[in-house]
Amino acid sequence: MMELLTPVTGFPLFGVLITIAAFYAGQKLYLKSNRHPVLQPVVIGMVVVVGTVIVLQVPYETYYQSSYLLHAMLGPATVALAIPLFQNARRIRSLLLPILLTVLVGGTFTVLLAVGILWLLGADTATLLSMPTKSITTPIAMIVTEQIGGIPALSAMFVLLTGAIGAMIGIPMMNRMGIQDDGVKGFTMGLTAHALGTARALEESKECGAFSALAMSLTGVLTAVLLPLIMQWIHQGL
């Protein structure tokens, strides 16, 4: 059976086609469910892609290489997030100081809370060092995690779980709390759930997406710059 599928899985654009098809199916299911928070297209798409790759016994390297076009589009897609930022530049400038303080305090608190829970559960040092990058995008997280002595693959899993859970429950939770301001919603999503949270925020409004993109960017930059310095300072102190 697998031999019959070899021409399909060996197709140069197999990864691109299966990923787009999985996301499209997830999007259709999401809309049909009246945007149920658990049925996020990214989460559904991820499950479908992983399941397909496992069932068809496609090596990860093969899937990765055959989805190169999608990797190439990550850069332009990230740059495109500057559009809602520009459209809301005036309000963002007026809130610059609160924004910076929120990133520093909120980002620090979420890291300490997550690492603290792992520590209470008895996690080893390498696992603890893989958690602080959970709220930034995967490429940055893996690089920073390697620099501070963590496990890059484990940090990627933490990033994925953080983004998926945040995208599913973030907006509904804030709605239940009575938070109506799209800027607050978006900033919270970007600060805690990075790109997946930003994708969800863009569904709410351009303003929500803009603040989410801003929070995601600032959190990524500050984490990449400050975390290695803090870890170096701690090691020197010890």
Image (tube, rainbow, N blue to C red):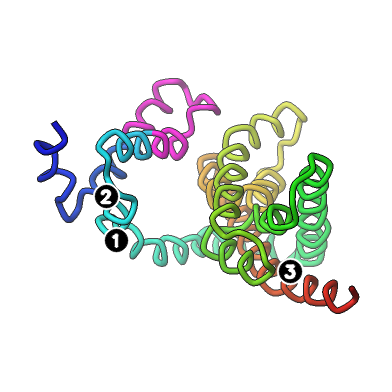
Mark 2 lies on residue: 15
Q: Residue furthest right?
A: 237
The residue under the point 65% across, 30% down is 172
Q: Is residue 148 magenta?
A: no
**Horizontal and vertical percent position of residue 76:** 39, 65
Residues packed near mark 1 inside 10 Å, few (<14), some (14 to 19) or many (20 plus): some
Mark 2 vs 1: CB contact within 8 A: yes
Mark 1 lies on residue: 68
**Horizontal and vertical percent position of residue 80:** 44, 62
The residue under the point 58% across, 42% down is 161
The residue under the point 42% across, 39% down is 46
**Horizontal and vertical percent position of residue 96:** 76, 66
Mark 3 lies on residue: 227
Mark earlier in primary sequence (3, 2): 2
Q: Residue furthest top?
A: 33
Q: Is residue 40 magenta?
A: yes
Mark 1 vs 3: CB contact within 8 A: no
Amino acid type at mark 2: Gly
Q: Is residue 177 left or right of residue 149?
A: right
